[in-house]
Image (cartoon, grey):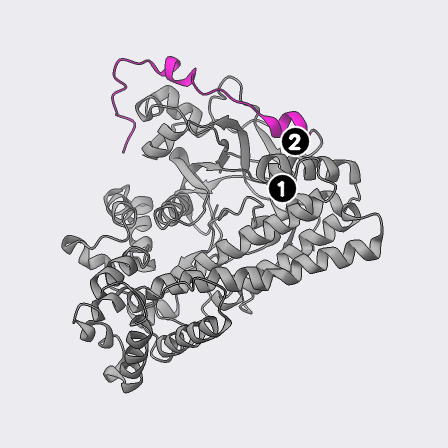
Amino acid sequence: MTSTVNIGIESSDEAFSRLVFDNSYARDLAGTYAPWKPQAWPQPQLVRLNQALAEELGLPAAALATPAGVAILAGNTVPEGAQPLAQAYAGHQFGHLSPQLGDGRALLLGEVIDRQGRRRDIALKGSGQTPFSRRGDGRAALGPVLREYLVAEAMQALGIPTTQALAAVTTGDMVQREQPLPGAVLVRVASSHIRVGTFEFFAVRQDWDLLRRLIDYTIARHDPQWIGHPDRTLELLRGVAQRQAELVAQWMGVGFIHGVMNTDNMALSGETIDYGPCAFMEGYDPATVFSSIDTYGRYAYRNQPGIAQWNLARLADCLIPLIDDDGARAVERATTVIDAFAGYYDRAWLAVMRAKLGLPEPVDADTDADAADRALIDALLALLARDRVDFTLGFRRLSTALRSEEQRWLGLFDAARPEAQDWLAHWRSRLAASAGSNETVATQMDRVNPLYIPRNHLVEAALAAASDQGDYAPFERLLAVISDPYRERAEDAAFTVPAPAEQTARYRTFCGT
């Protein structure tokens, strides 16, 4: 989509008058941010607009595609009622505390209440230098902006909590990286941009007054049932732990690797945030790493649950002084929540994997059934790992075995290993206890096992075409395919083919936005 969309009978001014900002972060948390204005760009051009998201926010998409709309999306014009600000936060980056990070190339424009009554942040990424930029230029290149747009929409289509891109806009200038690249701005929408690192910023400074205000603000926004409760700080920690356990379990279920699970990239809302060196795994290997800077595999696929727990422990460190006046008791109570994370995650992961295999959930708690299902799941993962079977196809094609086409699944393994045939028989035996017919179970499985993901070679080809040639057709085509990930379409068969193994083995992504 370009900026040539007709706006019909409604003027852009009338459309934008509907966008009523209610900026509670700016209003309630003075001292946690720096007011700032985005940089103006010479020739902003709209290259992609999320029409469905625009409508959710109460803005006709056509109005955003006008020159006046593009000026707002690029940051050249600050809409009435917005209060652009750069948020302060710290963060543990690869395990080491950086006491001051903050929005170095992003600005929170403000908050709106969408059509469903939900409070949503609208933010710009790549909007220029801020007081937190350090030595950075505050800009973003087109490729990373389109990557975040694409992967966030894939996650949305997969039903995984995520921030979303409202728009991608080119700036009309070049960004200097290893080579000059087209500059761009991403407009991001989130339930909030409150991070573990936001709490760390004030805890490391022992600013308990601001920390208390931040706790109460976050509870009001994400866990309002605990407003005014004497144990609200502990319950905030518990709520974050439960949300993160469910989120990471869903990542694991689709082979998603975030790439940089630093504490400043972990949102208390439970949404996936900051799509930098992220990717979807193809050949299954639990040690898979895609980030160019993750030398030691800290954020490898298999480490994501443990890292989430580690990040939660850093949040607990910040909250302990406000959990209980008795320091020892505060530590004990916080530790109980952190230790409970493993159970939260295990239950969420088991539910995800059962759905992928069509296994029924026990009516009541059944430790024997849980153990048997875990063993079945682990055996399948071991088979996938041994032959580096494509993770997405390894699950998606299982349903064909219930439709008398088992060779489509067995053919994924080297020489149709007899171990795979044995596993298939065991799985079918387990399914025999289900009340559903084979076709019913297969249909249910196809609703949770995607066929189309943003495969890395396709992503790179689409981004290269856009950045190097100004050709957005491959990006638009891939976006359309991954936005409907479960319904098989013959014309999209090429999008299910994994990259050559040698290409996958050396594939790395980079922090860009």
Q: Is residue 302 above or below residue 41?
A: below
Would you identify the image quadrant in which residue 218 lies? top right
Disc 2, disc 1: CB below 8 Å? Answer: yes
Within 10 Å of disc 1 (Cα), the crowding (few <14, some 14-19, many 20+) is: many
Residue at horizontal 54%, vertical 40%? Answer: 137
Q: Residue at x 32, y 32 (%)?
A: 51
The residue singled out by tag 1 in the image is 102
Magenta-span inclusion, residue 22:
yes
- In the foreground, 309 or 207: 309
Q: State the predominant SS element of the stretch in magenta.
A: loop
Q: Secondary structure at mark 1?
A: loop
The residue labelled by disc 2 is 34
SS label for mark 2: strand
Is 284 displayed left or right of 317 in the figure?
Answer: left
Q: Residue extending furthest left?
A: 490
Q: In which quadrant is the N terminus drawn?
A: top left
Which three-letter amino acid code belongs to the residue tagged 2?
Ala
Label 2 Cα crowd, 10 Å radius (few <14 / some 14-19 / many 20+): some
Count numbered badges in the picture.
Answer: 2
Q: Foreground: 291 or 413?
A: 413
Task: Give the magenta part as a residue range.
Answer: 1-29
Residue 56 appears in the picture as rendered: yes
First in sequence: mark 2 or mark 1?
Answer: 2
Q: Is residue 381 left or right of residue 429?
A: right
Residue 217 at x, y = what percent?
65, 34
Question: Does residue 236 belong to the magenta stretch?
Answer: no
Vertical placement of residue 366 versus 188, above or below: below
